[in-house]
Image: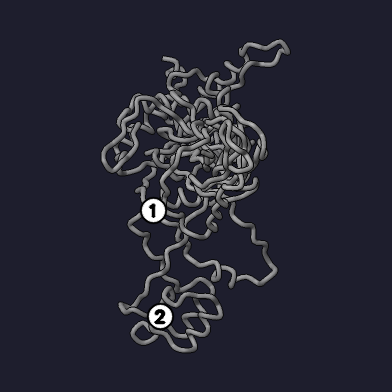
């Protein structure tokens, strides 16, 4: 019997992917473990291996095809002793990938998969798509929106949905003046609430409404790629479903800067007399956050509806900017690692993240995250929590500020940090304990070594 090679699921949330490249062609023999294709997910490109042995009889999905559903047949493998031509001739036509704007098809029963994810990861070209915005609900307590004929005509010409226009006429009737105001974004109602099946990205204005505000030819439309859609979907879901609150503290990092300078100056050299490591302030931040979570273990948690996950280790995600978006590679068990080890791991992660060569297990999960915009001169900011994390630490720049000590004004190197907390999992007092523990460690870096 011919063996169907299926579109593999390379992550728990993957529904579709792009078939980036075939590394084998029809008629080629393969054995178990051979890398035969590259599949693109939203943030990584994974090499996939053949599980069975045989000959590629028919390739049903050509390379470069986008939005191929998981478990769709992408090729047919003829087993040993089988007629390759007959197996190829009998292969079913490849199912067409659903357009990006459509909702994902219902899950199909998965036949025996003929692919497995290989350990290596290559450059990514994102493919995930965001769900469509929920349609606006009718208003005024009726099944239709009351409006004047002129208002309906003006709204139709402007591409504005009448149900989202606040009516100023009698009994809430939408009149021409309301539509004219809506063209500039005024008088529009909030988008409809998300469905019970989960949050959807609900823009405040439709594409037609936004485009109507600008002169044709005065802009360029750059289609969203999969990574940008995925970021939008996940962070929108976060702010819609996670009750955020924020705690800010100023940290005096004078001792840290002195320790960093001394450590870097005494770093061992390689054969070319280059230092084996060069610590950054961010390396100290990662280590301090990891130890703080160990000292305040009730904050090292993830929320689930059935119960709280209390983590034994501090797995710290670190936001890294990359073309088209960002990604958070994770320093696993950061509380157990030296500053030089954390530094080396981060340099490796950052380089491979920007080249889109991270493996899914290197950026999925984690117990908290750090987002540092200090290098851009940002004094302070708030960051959006990335579920399943319950916290994220936003780190601003270090700058000399005037402080009062023992009644005297002195200059000090101050760094502002803001902790975003999921109020379902981390209450205000608990969050304060966590950021307080971080402040003590970052201001007294010798305590990280104890």
Tally of numbered tags: 2
Q: Which mark is residue 93?
A: none
Query: Considering depth in this image, is 24 or 285 the residue closer to the camera?
Result: 24
Q: Position of residue 20 (x, y in %)?
A: 63, 43
Question: Which residue is denoted by mark 1 in the rendering?
Answer: 240
Q: Residue at x 44, y 18 (%)?
A: 336
Query: Considering depth in this image, is 294 or 114 the residue closer to the camera?
Result: 114
Query: Considering depth in this image, is 437 or 242 the residue closer to the camera?
Result: 242
Q: Position of residue 441 (x, y in %)?
A: 42, 24
Marks 1 and 2 in Cβ contact (< 8 Å): no
Other residues around mark 1 within 10 Å, as few (<14) / some (14–19) / many (≥20): some
Secondary structure found at label 2? loop
Comes first in the chain, label 1 or label 2: 2
Question: Which residue is denoted by mark 2 in the rendering?
Answer: 167
In the image, residue 16 sits, relative to residue 426, either above or below, namely below
Q: Residue at x 50, y 17 (%)?
A: 338
Q: Position of residue 341 (x, y in %)?
A: 54, 19
Quadrant containing the C terminus in the rendered view: top left
Q: Residue at x 45, y 62 (%)?
A: 133
Q: Residue at x 30, y 77 (%)?
A: 141
């Amino acid at each position: 019997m011919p063996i169907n090679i299926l579109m593999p699921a390379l992550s728990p949330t993957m529904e579709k992917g792009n078939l980036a490249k075939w590394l084998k062609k029809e008629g080629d023999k393969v054995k178990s473990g051979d890398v035969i294709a590259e599949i693109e997910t939203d943030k990584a490109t994974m090499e996939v291996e053949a599980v069975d042995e045989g000959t590629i009889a028919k390739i049903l999905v050509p390379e470069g095809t986008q939005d191929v559903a998981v478990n769709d047949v992408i090729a047919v493998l003829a087993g040993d002793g089988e007629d390759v031509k007959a197996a190829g001739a009998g292969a079913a036509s490849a199912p067409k990938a659903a357009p990006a704007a459509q909702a994902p098809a219902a899950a199909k029963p998965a036949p025996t998969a003929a692919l497995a994810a290989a350990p290596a990861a290559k450059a990514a070209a994102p493919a995930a798509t965001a769900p469509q915005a929920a349609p606006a609900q009718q208003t005024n307590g009726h099944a239709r929106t009351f409006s004047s004929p002129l208002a309906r005509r003006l709204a139709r010409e402007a591409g504005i949905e009448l149900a989202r226009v606040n009516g100023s006429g009698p009994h809430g009737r939408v009149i021409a003046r309301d539509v004219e105001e809506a063209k500039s974004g005024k008088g529009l109602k909030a988008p409809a609430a998300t469905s019970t099946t989960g949050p959807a990205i609900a823009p405040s204005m439709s594409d037609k409404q936004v485009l109507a505000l600008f002169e044709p030819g005065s802009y360029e439309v750059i289609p969203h790629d999969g990574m940008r859609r995925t970021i939008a979907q996940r962070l929108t879901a976060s702010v819609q479903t996670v009750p955020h609150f924020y705690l800010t503290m100023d940290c005096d990092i004078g001792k840290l800067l002195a320790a960093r300078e001394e450590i870097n100056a005494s770093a061992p050299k390689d054969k070319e007399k280059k230092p084996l490591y060069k610590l950054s302030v961010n390396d100290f931040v990662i280590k301090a956050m990891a130890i703080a979570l160990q000292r305040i273990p009730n904050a090292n948690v993830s929320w689930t509806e059935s119960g709280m996950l209390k983590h034994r280790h501090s797995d710290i995600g670190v936001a890294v900017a990359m073309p088209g978006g960002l990604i958070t590679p994770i320093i696993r068990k950061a509380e157990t690692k030296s500053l030089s080890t954390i530094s080396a791991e981060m340099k490796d992660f950052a380089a491979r993240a920007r080249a889109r060569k991270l493996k899914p297990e290197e950026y999925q999960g984690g117990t908290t995250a750090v987002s540092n915009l200090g290098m851009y001169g940002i004094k302070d900011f708030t960051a959006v929590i990335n579920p399943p994390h319950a916290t994220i630490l936003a780190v601003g720049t270090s700058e000399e500020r005037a402080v009062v000590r023992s009644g005297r004004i002195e200059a000090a190197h101050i760094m502002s940090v803001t902790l975003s907390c999921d109020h379902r999992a981390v209450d205000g007092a608990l969050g304060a304990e966590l950021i307080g523990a971080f402040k003590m460690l970052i201001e007294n870096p010798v305590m990280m070594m104890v």
